Image: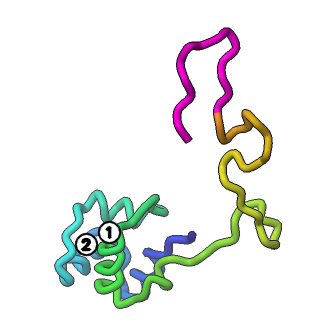
Amino acid sequence: MKWNLRWAAAKRDIWRPADLLKAFEEVEFTPSLSKVAALWSGKPISVRLDDLDKICAALGCTVADLLEAEPLAGAGGGEQEQKAAGAGGQPGGPGRPSPRAGGSRRSLPPN
């Protein structure tokens, strides 16, 4: 996903995190300045849905303005097949650990 917070803020003539914080306070959203700076400076790993609603309310935008789908790296433009972990049909593959050589008495964790 591409995070377009700066673009959405620029459409509202907001150019600094401190100005963005003021816009958030207008809609009664009061994150810390460090959280606002983290949202401003890069792509966040996660954003709470209620925070996303408040960000959209403050900027007068939609979620689609903030988040844009990007093709996956190495997808080659076609449909990418997704497999569950360990679904390669190979016992002891990367999805499930194999017992250690040397006869460890500990059992494997449950699936």
Q: CA distance from mark 1 to mark 2?
A: 6 Å
From the viewer's perspective, is residue 53 above or below residue 75? Answer: below
**How far across and down, in percent of the image, does residue 93 sit?**
73, 37
Q: Residue at x 17, y 79 (%)?
A: 28
Q: Quadrant of residue 48?
A: bottom left
**How far across and down, in percent of the image, does residue 99 sit?**
66, 22
Q: Main secondary structure of the magenta part?
A: loop
Residue 88 on the magenta segment: no
Q: Nearer the viewer, residue 4 or 48?
A: 48
In the rendered image, which residue does mark 1 sit on? Answer: 17
In the image: residue 3, left or right of residue 19: right
Q: Residues within 10 Å of mark 1 (few under 14, many from 20)?
A: many
Circle 2: residue type = Leu
In the image: residue 1, left or right of residue 31: right
Q: Quadrant of residue 38?
A: bottom left
Quadrant of the snapshot with the N terminus: bottom right
Mark 2, secondary structure of its residue:
helix
In the image: residue 30, left or right of residue 40: left
Could you say which disc has been placed on residue 21 in the image? 2
Q: Nearer the viewer, residue 56 or 18?
A: 56
**How far across and down, in percent of the image, does residue 47 sit?**
39, 66
Residue found at the very far top of the displayed protein: 102
From the viewer's perspective, is residue 40 above or below residue 4? Answer: above
Q: Residue at x 42, y 87 (%)?
A: 62
Q: Where are the magenta residues, as a range? A: 97-111
Q: Residue at x 53, y 37 (%)?
A: 110
From the viewer's perspective, is residue 109 above or below residue 86? Answer: above
Whether residues under marks 1 and 2 lie with C-beta atoms below 8 angstroms apart, the answer is yes
Count the numbered circles shown. Answer: 2
Residue 98 on the magenta segment: yes
Mark 1, secondary structure of its residue:
helix
